[in-house]
Amino acid sequence: LPHTDSALGAPQLPAAVFGGDIVAGSGRDVRVEQWIAPGRVNIIGEHTDYNDGFVLPIALPLGVVCGARPRGDGLVRLTSAQRRDEVIELRVDTLAAQRDRLPRWARYPLGVVHEFVRGGHRVTGVDLELDGAVPIGAGLSSSAALCCAVTIALRDLFAPALTDRSMVEIARAAENGFAGVPTGLLDQSASILCTEGHALFLDIRAFSEAESAAVEQIPFDLSGAGLTLLVADTGHPHDLADGGYAERRAQCEAAADALSLSALRDATSEDLPHLSDPVLRRRARHVVSENARVLAVVDRLRAGADPRAIGALLTASHHSLREDFEVSAPALDLAVDAALDAGAHGARMVGGGFGGSIIALVEDADHVAQNIMNRFATTGFAPPRIFAVQPAAGARKLD
Ligand code: GAF
């Protein structure tokens, strides 16, 4: 996958690789058009989405490009710049039956096609040509970016009336069902709904019930405040399908059940002593405290406070994910500690955890990046990939 190896500098989107060619179809020429959907980092609100809680992601300037061209013969033909030796061609109406024979990566885009068909949309056939620039296994939502890029392309080609919320639901259903990965709504919402220069404040419960009131775009201008948001991909892979994520979800459901609540979103700190199982109590404490931290960050940003004021809440989030939710990992803790020791205002792991990336809110990006690199070298870990990001745009058609 293309990404930067330098210590700093935002990775560039790949050059357009599919644009422009004209294919003779049945009676008319159909141009390949392109759509892009970004990966994300979550500023705060981790493991809250499947508890009906609050999240605050930004889109990354890194995405998956989907070239798409409608066909009339009922076939879907799938290629990927990252899998040049594989061309997958199937009938749209046999996708479900073929699912188990498909390579894992192909289940994400084909799961989206399957969801369109299942939703009653008439997909007459399509060529899909993918090119991804979001590092895989880095906790930066490469799979959601992939699903969302295909979703927005199919929306424009076959179902133009679909709302943003329906697109989020389709992308999530493809990932949960066809691809078999039990995510919440955070990643797909971020990829579809984020806007440039803003953090997306989402109340997941309200969004699941009705789109409009639940989405708030909050200006998030770090460079104007002289700050940089660093992302450090530790290179220690994270995999949502490896069991730890599903176990955390089950523990949260068990804690909500034990408190007779429909979701931990409704729990308060007074409820926690009523959980006799210490593991469930810790899991619930993370969710309760993390939701409160999201709201505190949102309050500060809405009030136009200096973004430095959110740093301590980011670090508190990391501690809660490490101690109470137990989803951090040695490489994540090392990167967070190295960033804080070098003067970061706040730092935390992002995404599902067990590996992947951290973010750090910093003044002196070079100094902090260098300290993380040094600490990894001293510990014998392979060098992390570190880059600076600004809030980028969500999924869209490319010109
Ligand atoms: C992963 C999941 F896909 C999200 O839904 C979310 O639960 C996140 O982990 C943790 O906040 O990215």
Image: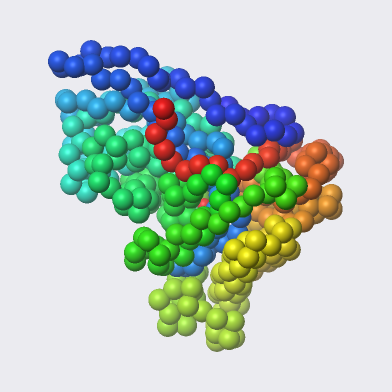
Measured as percent of width and height from the top left, residue 376 is found at: 78, 41
- The residue nearer to you, when weighing 328 against 17, is 17
Residues 357 and 65: in front is 65
Q: On the rendered image, what quadrant is the N terminus found in?
A: top right
Residue at 49% over, 31% down: 132
Q: Quadrant of residue 352?
A: bottom right
Q: Residue at x 65, y 61 (%)?
A: 304
Rendered position, 42 above or below 33: below
Q: How is the image coloured?
A: rainbow
Q: From the image, which quarter does the C terminus lie in?
A: top left
Asked if residue 84 lies left or right of residue 330, the reply is left
Position of 155 relative to 320 (above/below): above
236 or 63: nearer the eye?
A: 63
Where does residue 216 sit, x and y in percent of width and height?
A: 48, 59
Q: Position of residue 120 (x, y in %)?
A: 18, 46
Instruction: Measuring from the top left, give residue 9's x and y in whole percent.
Output: 69, 33
Residue depicted at x 41% and y 20%: 18
Tell me which residue sits at (43%, 41%) in the image. Answer: 395
* Residue 80 falls left or right of residue 125: right
Q: Is residue 31 visible?
A: yes
In the rendered image, is residue 100 in sight?
no
Compared to residue 346, the image places residue 64 above or below, namely above
